[in-house]
Image (cartoon, grey):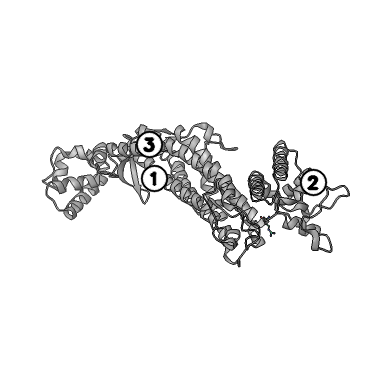
Amino acid sequence: MIRADDTPAPQPNDPPTHKLWGGRFDEPTDAFVEAFTASVGFDHRLYREDIAGSMAHARMLARVGVLTDAECAQIVKGLQDIQLDIERGDFAWIVAFEDVHMNIEARLIDRIGEVGKKLHTGRSRNDQVATDVRLHLRGAIDRIGQELTRLRLGLVELAEREADTVMPGFTHLQVAQPISFGHHLMAWYEMLTRDAERLKETRARVNVLPLGSAALAGTSYPLDRAFVAEQLGFDRISRNSLDAVADRDFAIEFLADAALLMMHLSRMSEELILWTSAQFGFVRLPDRFCTGSSIMPQKKNPDVPELVRGKTGRVYGDLFSLLTLMKGQPLAYNKDNQEDKEPLFDAIDTVLGSLRAFADMIPALEPDRARMRAAACQGFATATDLADYLVRQGVAFRDAHEIVGKAVRHAQNAGCDLADLPLATLQQFSGKIAEDVFAVLTPEGSLAARDLPGGTAPNQVRAQIAAAKAALTAP
Ligand code: ARG
């Protein structure tokens, strides 16, 4: 965003700024308006997609006889050289040319002369920018998918090492029942797997070619749209030119996926922050993922998860920016749509950075198994197991619940766990309790008992892990 006090004063030896659309204008654009309406400051990021799209368009124009083969070759070569210039850092982005599209086109004309003026035949910046953004987002979705796979693989491998590790499971953040740490990690895996599926489904709706829609109504040239789609790797061409240049629902859909993904990373972050605290002490984070305090020498802060939790807010904001951007727009393209890029790029960068940090960090977690087990033995985590035991001895569940509640109160007053009460004491609550009760009161016994698909018994966790590994390595 250009602020009023940033308005660049035109300098006498500024580069040429002949507008590509200047024909009907009587006076030059106001200097501030020029800066205010320009997008090149952020959309130059689309240069690769813009050049790829232009090359495909030029080749198609030659194929249908609008350009000669020689003209096409000159244009393609000019575009290749421009790409090299940009990548060498030898390309001045000029605000007067407004955006990435007109900067590249102006440079092309500058480089190859008259023939460069033929590139824009049968095309508008409206279908051009929609194409560029779709190509860019497709690439971003693929990179996000790769980082997600790396993170999911890290979770599965850690879960495999920790399938037998006992930890307390929580509801209301109160100790509920013992669970396998591997089971908890596989819950995270499931959340992220749905995120990966959502992105894949979104990709199919992103991967549609708008070029050929021109400004809004299509074009009078006999364009071969299928040929362009094939060259650019699009699955299909858009069906309606007005819709193709106007809507950004595909970007909003991506941002909704991104918001959900960040919501999951944020929940994982919150747990890691709790677990690394002195009070929980369930896991340690290696120093390379933490920072210290400038005043408190003892501090080691879990900055990576904290920052990911914080960054979740920006991605929610990006989603709301785009939803609000679109809601009042009449068909077809409006300049409002230029505002789609910064939130979209911000979300892409934030998601990629957060995933990268997590994918690096998860395999490095150092669980403290003894602390986790000790925590699982507090808070009467096996009370449900005692009730289930009584049910197996013929007691109705509601009665068993009542009996165990009384035993819990007794143990609480005695300052010990259910498993620490002598058999004779337990038998005061129910004559159905026998020596074998102690097997169900250990956290390991509690885990092993939940031996059904989706349950926390370590062999069930291993079955989840095996299925996840197969899915991750499937093509
Ligand atoms: N920079 C513009 C954008 O990002 C490109 C399309 C401009 N089209 C137009 N008719 N002014 O949306």
Q: Quadrant of the C terminus?
A: top left
**3 or 2: tag closer to the N-terminus:** 2
Q: Position of residue 120 (x, y in %)?
A: 70, 53
Label 1 – label 3 distance at C-alpha: 12 Å
For the residues labelled 3 and 2, say whether their Cβ atoms are less than 8 Å apart: no
* Kind of residue at badge 1: Glu
Q: Position of residue 340 (x, y in %)?
A: 61, 55
Write the residue at 75% across / 45% down. Answer: 108
Q: Relative to 162, is 10 above or below? A: below
Q: Quadrant of the N terminus?
A: bottom right
Residue 259 relative to residue 470: left or right:
right
Residue pointed to by mark 1: 190
Visible residue check, residue 177: yes
Residue pointed to by mark 3: 469
Label 1 Cα crowd, 10 Å radius (few <14 / some 14-19 / many 20+): some
Q: Relative to 213, is 272 above or below? A: above
Query: Would you identify the image quadrant in which residue 291 lies?
Result: top right
**1 or 3: tag closer to the N-terminus:** 1
Q: Nearer the viewer, mark 3 or mark 2?
A: 2
Q: Position of residue 419 (x, y in %)?
A: 23, 39
Q: Quadrant of ligand 1?
A: bottom right
